[in-house]
Amino acid sequence: MVAATIYIVTAFGFAVRWMRSGLSSESIFFFTVMVFVLIFQTQNVDLFVTFNMLNCLFMIAFLYSRKRAVASEPKPSAPQYQWETSMSQLEITEADDIRLIRERDYHNQRFENETREAQAKYYAAIKDGTAEFNSELVRLARSADVLEYGCGSAPTLFDVTGFRTGKGIDISDLAVAQNNKQAEKDGLRNIRFDTMNAEQMTFDDNSFDLVFGKGILHHLDIERSFSEIARVLRPGGTAMFLEPMGHNVVMNLYRSLTPSARTSDEHPLLRGDFSVARHHFGDVALTFYGLATLLSVPFRDTRIGDSIFNVTRLIDRTVFLIRACVGRHGMF
């Protein structure tokens, strides 16, 4: 009964969004979520077949409208930035230079002209995870030497206080220059940002008490990254990351429909990546977010948004507690 109620409410939200903004990736994404809920709950084969046929029709309509929209979009102009850091400074090897340069160029362009605004709304589904991550980060950073691994153009380091020294690295020279300028403006003398290859850092061994990052590991070679993070961490140090997961079928469908929102090298984390982590770190703790809470996204700016989020968050935590293996199907 509860599932049916959530389904009906979400369907209504889907219909309103569709009528107001047309068939979009968000609409098809949430319709697919609802179909998955129905598949899980229903024992009515005829109803199951009917809804799946309807879903196929929506998918065909969406792909057709997307094809027409893409054909009418003007080609993006070349980015207006200059790469000022030498290749030797990044320690880019011959085997990896194409991948790393592609990541660098994409993020330089993104930081100059944000290209992922359409995806920002989905982070509402993991706002509890973000809040818990930030709270733990502040606690661990006290009196510590801290490294923000993949700081981007909006470093979390600026929002953390109480650490001894703070370093931030990113492959984007544009982001690094902006961050250093902001740190100087704010008089933050214990913070410095450097353009650096995260898979081959130039820091000495045992340099940091805490290494953290948000949405960075899935851009990198996991084995090399974990090896480097373990190398620069001091004994007893902590590494903590907030990363997208790659087991959710619906999220993977959405990603396949929005390729321009990410680079071709991105790879949301999978179960096997945690085995690599356990090889490099003595203790690996995992917390998952964003499965049922995805249903709250269409209502995020409405009066009932918080209520729906709280209910779906409770569902997530209960399910993850009973069946921990389900957690990897969360968004993060």
Image (tube, rainbow, N blue to C red):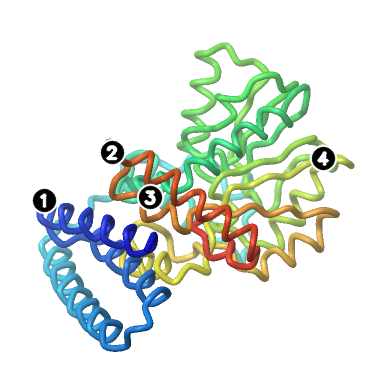
The residue tagged with tag 3: helix, strand or loop? helix
Contact check, label 2 and label 1, Cβ < 8 Å:
no
Q: What residue sits right under mark 1 in the picture?
A: 20
The residue tagged with tag 1: helix, strand or loop? helix
Judged by depth in the image, the label closer to the viewer, 3 or 2, is: 2
- Give me the C-alpha separation between circle 1 and circle 4: 50 Å
**Disc 1 residue type?**
Arg
**Disc 2 residue type?**
Asp
Q: Position of residue 131 (x, y in %)?
A: 55, 36
- Give me the C-alpha separation between circle 3 and circle 1: 19 Å
Contact check, label 4 and label 3, Cβ < 8 Å:
no
Mark 2 or 1 closer to N-term?
Answer: 1
Q: What residue sits right under mark 4 in the picture?
A: 237
Which residue is at the front of the view, 157 or 110?
Answer: 157
Q: Give the residue drawn at x 56%, y 24%.
A: 158
- Give me the C-alpha separation between circle 2 and circle 4: 39 Å
The residue tagged with tag 2: helix, strand or loop? loop
Q: Give the residue drawn at x 62%, y 31%.
A: 135
